Image (cartoon, grey):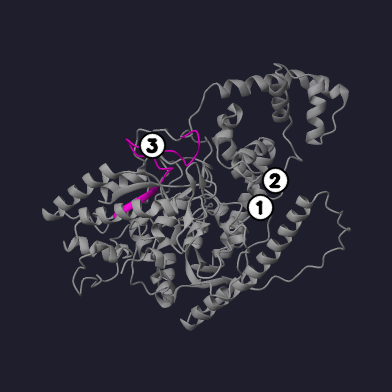
Amino acid sequence: MLDRRRFLNVCAGVGVGGTLLPGVLWAHAQAEGKKKISKELIENAAAVADVPISDAQKEMMLAGLNDQIEGYGAIYALHMPNSVDMALVFDPLLPGMKVNTAKQPMRMSAAPNVASNGIPKNLETLAFANVREWSELLRTRKVSSAALTDMYLERLKRYNPTLKFVVTLTEERARAQAKEMDREIAAGKYRGPLHGLPWGAKDLLSVKGYPTTWGAGGFEKQTLEEDATVVQRLDAAGAVLLAKLTLGALAMGDEWYGGKTRNPWNPAQGSSGSSAGPASATAAGCVAFSIGSETLGSIASPSTRCGCTGLRPTFGLIPRTGAMALSWSMDKLGPICREVEDCAIVLNAIYGPDGKDRTVNEAAFNWNADVDWKKFRVGYLKADFEPQKEQPQPAAAPEKPAATPEEQKKRDEQKKLRELQQQQRAYTRKYNDAALAKLREMDVDLIPVEMPKLPYDAMVAMLSAEAAAAFDDLTRSGRDKLLTAQKDDDWPNQFRTARFIPAVEYVQAARARMLAMQAVAKAFDNFDVIVAPTNSQQLVVTNLTGHPAVILPNGFRGDDAPRVPPGGDVDEDNIGGPGTPVSLTFLGQLYGEAKLLAFARAYQRATGFQNMHPKAFVVS
């Protein structure tokens, strides 16, 4: 549920310097086929852990360590499935915080007159209509769910060879659902604004009768015979599931066992991830909306890359029952759509306790499209919008000559890439500046605010440890070699490295996270909404604290944008070249989605970037 490589390298600094001694010993014992810990193994492990231990102390440790090792084996023998959560429950609410639990009827925007000129013969010309528009066409029976389902299924099939965003089509299920939804509308039974709308699910949500692959080699035929809570709720709302869409293997990036999901604005570029398929299919007009997930950037990053509007809700608003677990204290499900109000309508159908996910709080989401957003208190992360001052660097030691021509070529490529990244950051800054100017033009009184200075990246050790635990058997069995990506920043190596995070340091990171929650809560005390660049430290901060975010398109790079050199890695630092989207993020208070979405909608309507679509996928 994160795209670490490209969005933020949040795990820099999480190493093996403070290795958990028993964990190292266990690894040594397994590697050497030994059943017991010896003084020699303690000495080797102590060297890795950088812990001085005398010979007498080693003798004292032997019995206790061997007892611990036995305990590890007993727990491994339980063969716990991914669906078993931790006994500890993360709650973003601090003591004294209260949330509104009084629910009110949803108040959508006025019904659009989308059929004023009649319904076109080719329904595909409306492929990019938003949820509000489709709901009105279906409600008034100007369009049938069956016709809409056929149109989107055909587009999914046509564009999948290019974009690689489908894992499994749920075609039989979809056609049966659509037929039933049409029958109900004809009989006067209308379930609400999602009735008959086709959607796509990130393939970490379980669906009865279909594989749930998690995008990972070795899991291609995995079936989980239950419908995830979100799937059940969208079924109940009348939405029609068309496909299980791609995610990077085990929720990392955009590479899955079937290939690399692509960005509709630039198919040479990956869609980013890990909600790769949901963002790509939504941006290409192949579903009405989709459901993605985020642990650390997996809605924000692909929404940015593909020009979608994504909602990462407050942690504990939407139940994750039936979804793959990566980090029990950070995973979140959320909609990826074409417009802000689409996100509000979908959220209204899927939020709230299900009696199974213990993290979900009883909070109300009361959407009102006509709320007076001008009364909201709005801050902006001033330091994140300003150019970063170059820090004086000590003189570097002369670089040793490259040993081979290949090594020199690699050095040259890395230097060019760093220069390109700097150019891209400088280029993108003008879109952030334009956003602030537009908000002021809207008479928004922007008040500068700063996020508290804390070692947030170090707290991400919690995510790393939880992810390694969630897929512990994959690592110990060696089946991690079946995963497509095997570089140093991919899951197999990340999981192995995380086994060296001390249990004590996991707890210390959790305590530091509490300090962060307290400090960030104070920063939000005076604001309903905070404006932020998407690709900044706030992404790590707010995922740790559980605050909600809306990510929306904020313009498109012009012909003067930095271009990727021939053969360059177009994924690096989100460099998409001319014509590709940039984004802006709005942050909200815990369980403050109603105000957050209302403000984001006002900005979106004032800018109109959501109305632009990749030309290669538009049928006129």
Q: Position of residue 556 (x, y in %)?
A: 50, 71
Give SS at disc 2.
loop
Outermost residue toward the front in this view: 405
Identify the main secondary structure in magenta: loop
Q: CA distance from mark 3 to mark 2?
A: 34 Å
Magenta residues (range): 198-219
Three-letter code for the amino acid on which mark 2 is drawn: Val
The structure residue drawn at horizontal position 65% and vertical position 49%, both measured from the top left corner, is: 459
**Callout 1: SS:** helix
Residue visible at 60% across and 29% down in the picture: 478
Kindly identify which residue carries mark 1: 457
Question: Image point 35% across, 54% down: which residue?
Answer: 158
Mark 1, residues whose alpha carbon is within 10 Å: few (<14), some, or many (≥20)?
some
Relative horizontal placement of residue 112, taking residue 589 as reference (left or right)? left
Q: Is residue 321 above or below residue 46?
A: below
State which tag comes first along the sequence, 3 or 2.
2
Q: Secondary structure at mark 3?
A: loop
